[in-house]
Amino acid sequence: MKTNTCTNGVLNAITKQIRILLIEEDARALDLIQKLLEELGHSVIAFFHSASALEKYRETWQEIDIVAVGMQKAESDDLMGIALHKINPGVKILFYRKDQIAAGLYIYQVEHGGFKNKINNLM
């Protein structure tokens, strides 16, 4: 089966170990998302507080592939994006909502039989 460039990029992202800086203000979600990403083979540095995460990113941005930020309010998300971009203009940021993570976990569970009973902990 021949895949297009977009599909190849997604497949590479899934199979390649990614170094992720995770910022989430919900402690339960932070723990769960970190564990799931690590189960998938990714390296995760998790932070509950944005200020601490920004300081860590400032120190280690060359070692981070992507910053994943749990969405809160539009204003604070905008400020986080601006702050990260000032540190590294080439930063890759993924803003996500917990319901998106739960939906993705459900699809993964149905297709692969993985992460059973973990979705309920996120909701």
Image (cartoon, rainbow, N blue to C red):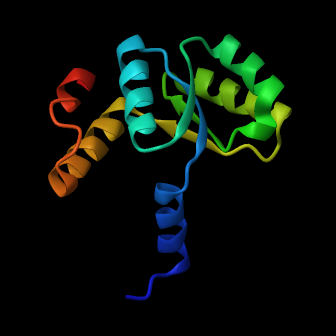
Q: At 54% across and 13% down in the image, what residue appears?
A: 48
Q: Position of residue 39 (x, y in %)?
A: 39, 38
Residue positioned 51% across, 72% down in the render: 8
Q: Position of residue 122 (x, y in %)?
A: 27, 24
Position of the N terminus by quadrant: bottom left
Residue in the foreground of this view, choosing between 99 and 120: 120
- Quarter where residue 57 is shown: top right
In which quadrant of the rendered view does residue 21 lie?
Answer: top right
Residue 105's place in the image compared with 77, above or below, is below
Give the percent coordinates (x, y) of residue 36: 37, 34
Image quadrant where one finds the C terminus:
top left
- Looking at the image, residue 80 sits to the left or right of residue 58; the answer is left
Measuring from the top left, give residue 24's x and y in whole percent.
49, 21
How many numbered callouts? 0
Quadrant housing residue 98: top left
Q: Is residue 55 above or below residue 45?
A: above
Residue at x 63%, y 16% (from the top left corner):
50
Residue 57 placement, left or right of 120: right
Residue at 55% across, 31% down? 44
